[in-house]
Image (cartoon, helix red, strand yellow):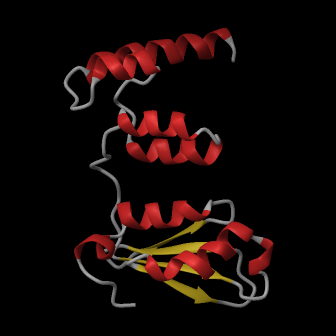
């Protein structure tokens, strides 16, 4: 990390720490752990994908705040190619062992697609996310946090 990057990170930490004093997390504990209390919980999910340290991720989640401006979706469809599914073992495991238990998620087998998550918003617009690098638990967590059908009612799919 360059000196400039370090200085920017320290400044951001100081500003966020000051703002965190009004947050509902234990600010002192979070500061001791190296967190500001201002990170959104979705940042902890990203951290979990990048590092394999469960304790660090749990500490992050204890110091994060829900992202109220987070886009919510009314449906989610995981699109995968049935013939190439074995190329992505995490996705294959999720599809075969976990996907049926995730409310609000439909799995669609489509020839020659790279794994992707198709999300539909209330305004009818759709978004597509590439997910071939996601870990198996990330799908369930993402759908639980971001798809309203997963929390409000059973999916129509």
Using the rendered image of the protein, determine whether residue 49 is visible from the camera's viewpoint. Answer: yes
Residue drawn at (38%, 40%) of the image = 40
Q: Is residue 28 above or below residue 142?
A: above
Residue drawn at (36%, 36%) of the image = 62
Question: Where, quadrant-wise, is the N terminus in this rendering?
Answer: top right
Question: In the rendering, at what x and y percent does residue 118 appear?
Answer: 51, 76
Question: In the rendering, at what x and y percent does residue 116 appear?
Answer: 61, 72
Q: Is residue 99 above or below residue 130?
A: below
Quadrant of the image occupied by residue 11: top left
Position of 1 with respect to 53 (left or right) is right
Quadrant of the image occupied by residue 15: top left
Q: Nearer the viewer, residue 155 or 100?
A: 100
Quadrant of the image occupied by residue 61: top left
Using the rendered image of the protein, determine whether residue 16 is visible from the camera's viewpoint. Answer: no
Question: Where, quadrant-wise, is the C terminus in this rendering?
Answer: bottom left
Residue drawn at (54%, 84%) of the image = 107
Q: Nearer the viewer, residue 25 or 36?
A: 25
Question: In the rendering, at what x and y percent does residue 20 appear?
Answer: 28, 23
Please count the marks in the image.
Answer: 0
Question: In the rendering, at what x and y percent does residue 82 appear?
Answer: 72, 88
């Amino acid at each position: 990390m360059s000196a400039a990057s370090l200085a920017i990170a320290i400044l951001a930490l100081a500003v966020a720490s000051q703002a965190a004093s009004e947050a509902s997390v234990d600010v002192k504990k979070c500061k001791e752990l190296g967190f500001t209390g201002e990170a959104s919980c979705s940042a902890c999910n990203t951290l979990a994908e990048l590092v394999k340290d469960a304790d660090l991720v749990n500490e992050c989640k204890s110091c994060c705040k829900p992202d109220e401006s987070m886009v919510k979706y009314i449906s989610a469809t995981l699109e995968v190619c049935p013939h190439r599914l074995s190329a992505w073992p995490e996705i294959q495991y999720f599809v075969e062992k976990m996907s049926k238990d995730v409310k609000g998620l439909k799995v669609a087998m489509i020839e020659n697609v790279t794994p992707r998550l198709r999300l539909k918003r209330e305004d009818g617009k759709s978004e597509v996310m590439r997910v071939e690098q996601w870990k198996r638990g990330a799908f369930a967590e993402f759908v639980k946090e971001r798809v309203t059908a997963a929390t409000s009612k059973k999916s129509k799919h």
